Image (cartoon, rainbow, N blue to C red):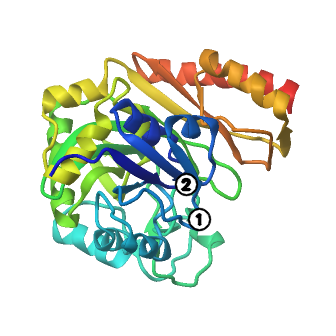
Amino acid sequence: MTLPVRLVIAGLSVRATAEAARRDGFDVVAVDQFGDADTRAAATAWHALAPLPDVGGGAPWLVTSGFDTPGALAALHSRPLLGTSPSAIDRVRDPRAFFAALDARGIAHPAVSLMPQAGAGWLCKDFASSGGQQVQPADEASRTPSPGRYWQQHVADAVPVSLTFIGNGERAALLGRNLQLLHPEATCPWRFGGLIGPLPMTGRQRTRLQGLADRLTSEFDLRGLASLDLLQVEEDAWLVLEINPRLSASLVLYGAAGGLMRAVVEACVHGRLPDEPALQRLRGPHLRGYEIVRMERPSVLDAAGVRALQQKAGALGLHDLPAGPQGFEAGDPLCSIEVEGDTADAVRRALAHQRTALDVFLETWT
């Protein structure tokens, strides 16, 4: 079977994936919620996510975030999905099945309960969501059980990280480990804010994480790009939180020079995984940082402001830019920032510097 020429990429926001696919020579049909300027530029056609359109002329579909609920997955059954199957995603997103499988394989995770728990030591989570939007202190959450909801013991002082890899249903090709950045606010204290990676790893860390990715890939038949959310509790010890069995935000850290989406499609179509030299090329020579920029107050960006923002894009490393005039509520995403650096601290400083410069701009235009 030859590789497809066209890909339909669908999700809440598909800009990074669409750009990666375009770099690798694919014709891209983008389906997402925002239709930002970067996504439209990377695709030959853009369509709104809801209602899910029938597009692509039989081209395979790849999905990002936004397909984490049973209803959303059901809509994909009539599409030629490339990657982890809907039935496998259902299993990953069922807390009863997911944590039982981890226990059967001896894979460590925080203590969980399918029945409501109370107290400062517990969180309420829901697999039918993403981006940390669903994580709440147990005492503030609804106590009504639902198919994706569960309660998890809070692990203090652990570092949230993620692992990005490509699977073929049996084995995994490890891209890297990433530091997760949080954008806490009153109603969403664990809201996802961005990523820095790939972090340096010792030989022992790489061996252990490779083994973990292999076991999870075979257990859940993971195919294509996937990411694993973890809590790092020691230098080479982690607790599993959840698997994102689809294209994830961490994709933006890899393949800047091309090759990532071709490797993903190769794994899905032929079961071939990139070798270590290819993986090293995908990691690149530097760490990369990605951060979402959210509006701090209700604002309107008019046509002149949009043009001025687009003119700042190159200097500030801005992406996911609005395609036209737009109103924002507090907390709405405006755009994202991407930077490079030699260390995680250098990347943090670069992100903070660019955000400060952007804030000065926003004071003028919003």
Q: Residue 232 placed where, x, y %?
A: 35, 45
Q: Earlier in the sequence, mark 1 or mark 2?
A: 2
Mark seen at residue 137: 1
How far is the residue under mark 1 from the one under mark 2? 26 Å
Task: Name the amino acid type tagged 2.
Answer: Leu
The answer to whether residue 200 shows anywhere in this view is: no
Residue 107 vs 156, above or below: the answer is: below
Q: Is residue 231 left or right of residue 43?
A: left
- Compare residues 103 and 354 and report the one nearer the observer: 354
Mark seen at residue 225: none
The secondary structure type at the circle numbered 1 is: strand
Q: Residue 116 placed where, x, y %?
A: 51, 81
Query: Which residue shows up at 14% across the image and 49% down it?
Result: 211
Q: Is residue 323 left or right of residue 301?
A: left
The secondary structure type at the circle numbered 2 is: loop
Q: Residue 42 placed where, x, y %?
A: 50, 36
Query: Which residue shows up at 28% across the image and 29% down it?
Result: 282
Residue 45 vs 41, above or below: the answer is: below
Find disc 2 in the rendering and name its residue.
12
- Compare residues 295 and 58 and report the one nearer the observer: 58
